[in-house]
Image (spheres, coloured by chain):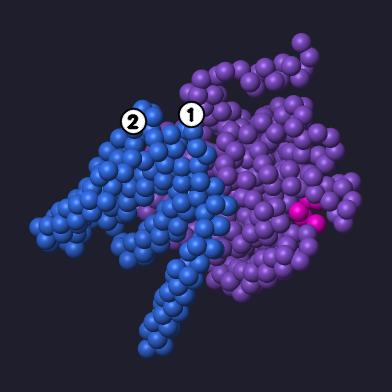
Chain colours: A purple, B blue
Amino acid sequence: MTGAAVMSSLLAAEVPYWASTIIKLGVVALVIPTAALMLGYVFLMKMMSFMQSRLGPMEAGPYGTLQLLADGLKFLQKEDIFPAKADRTVFALAPLVVLVSTFLIYVVIPTGPDAVVAQLDVGIFYALAVSSLSVVGILMAGWASANKYALMGGLRAAGQLIAYELPLVLAVMGVVIQAGTLDLQKIVTAQAEGEIFGWGGIGNPFILTQFVGFFIFLVAVQAETTQPPFDMPVAESEIVGGYQVEYTGFRFLFFFMGEFGTAFAFAALAAVLFLGGWALPWGDLTHWGFNIAGPVILLVKVMAVSALIFWFRFTYPRLREDQLQRLAWKFLIPLSLVNIVVTGIFKVVL
Amino acid sequence: MIAEHVAFGIIAAVMVASALRVVTTRDIMHAALYLVIVLAGVASLFLLVGAEFTGITQILIYIGAVIVLFLFGIMLTRSDFDQDEETDHKRKFPAILTALLLLAVMVGALVDRFEDVKLDANLPGGQTPQTTAQVSDELFSQYIVPFEAVSVLLLAALIGAIVIARREEGG
């Protein structure tokens, strides 16, 4: 059997609905910790260390590659502590809500012509909607901890949502107008099959025409994933970890995976929306090989976007909450509205 | 078809139970969180009948924004988990009466209107769900006047909110 036959028989095999759902859920459940580990090791540990002229973890595994696995095991062994005055049920559920929100974003990210958990007509709209659920988990954590620093962290997180949510959605609008669809899979094909003034050599990745949208999206993602310079809800030096302050062991691990898993998911969304996603502009997009090459291509782009996110993270000092509001409402939102109008005009004229 | 019925039954049961807890729990934070479950149930019912766009909008607006504002407000104004005197269900009989009246009116109206209407049983499986493009096409052609009217109404509410907030700030 040739590769194509194997692949197509694998894909066409009549798996019952429940079985394929379980397989897909399993894949997503494996991808999130792996993604969090990769970002944590490559950027948080190594890139930051190199930027600060130090080596970072070197002991666990070659070049410290197993450091985060060791940390993960350590977290799992720890006692599951509840503060005496905590609202126990809400306290216990909060990290799960954050993690479920992350989990749900991965469902729509396409990694190949058939390699996607669910191809939704509302694609990007769905991703942005479920990503906003994590704030509910953060507010639950902030409230249920019965700790003033946690409460302030939760309040800051909610205030931050007011700042970044609109630019995040509006930045995507330009891409949606250009592609004429919300479906992430179709956005990928629109870019791969697009042409720049009749020349289709590199397709038409939307970053070329939507660089303003790309910039706004990245700033909003920085705030959404509470990465510095917008890490006011956590802010170790001011409110000693914010909503995370009372969490230990595997519940803290959930928050960690949620944070880095969401950063990875948003980097993937940026790669899909602006950098062409899993596709290369050459060759047949429906070819089975893209189901294997696609994830690799997407991963390269995701790492490039993540490098930008973490580069900002390690470079800029923290803003105040009101400075973020001013940045969002007086600069990012007007800019993205102008971007939408200009894109709309070009869409009609061209 | 049977799968949809089972799903509807489960979702509806969870929603009714949570809705009851919203009004019976004495912890206002818990009430807000039970409301999240009810709203998520509404969203899943929309998804179940193939109205993807409406379902996702429900999540984005109600859970992602309205509930977050609720929680924000509670966290700003309450300081501990103590059972609140204000939530002691003093007016529970008028409330129950109103709820029952509303239920009667809505059941009456719905039965009166849809008694003989047979919905297309194949909708979730056979037909494709309503796409976002269809929704927007109808919104901007057939329903353009109501759409614009609602936009103006929202704008007025927005300006009104700012005016009220400003006045109190100035004293």
**Quarter in which the N terminus of chain A is drawn:** top right
Residue A3 lies left or right of residue A156; in this view the side is right
> Would you name the residue on which mark 1 appears?
A77
Residue A183 lies left or right of residue B17; in this view the side is right
- Which stretch is magenta? A204-208
Does the magenta stretch mainly form a helix, a strand or a loop? loop
Q: Nearer the viewer, residue A115 or A248?
A: A115
Distance from disc 2 to disc 1, alpha carbons, whole Å, reads: 40 Å
> Would you name the residue on which mark 2 appears?
B6
Name of the residue lying farthest toward the front: B116
In the rendered image, residue B44, in percent from the top left (x then y), is placed at 41, 43
**Quarter in which the C terminus of chain A is drawn:** bottom right
Res. B91 mark:
none
In the rendered image, residue A292, in percent from the top left (x then y), is placed at 74, 27
In the rendered image, residue B162, in percent from the top left (x then y), is placed at 44, 79
Amino acid, disc 1: Gln
Amino acid, disc 2: Val
Residue A293 lies left or right of residue B108; in this view the side is right
The residue positioned 75% from the left and 32% from the top of the image is A286
SS under mark 2: helix
Choose mark 2 or mark 1, whichever is in front. Answer: 2
Callout 2: residue from which chain?
B
Callout 1: residue from which chain?
A
Name of the residue lying farthest toward the top: A1
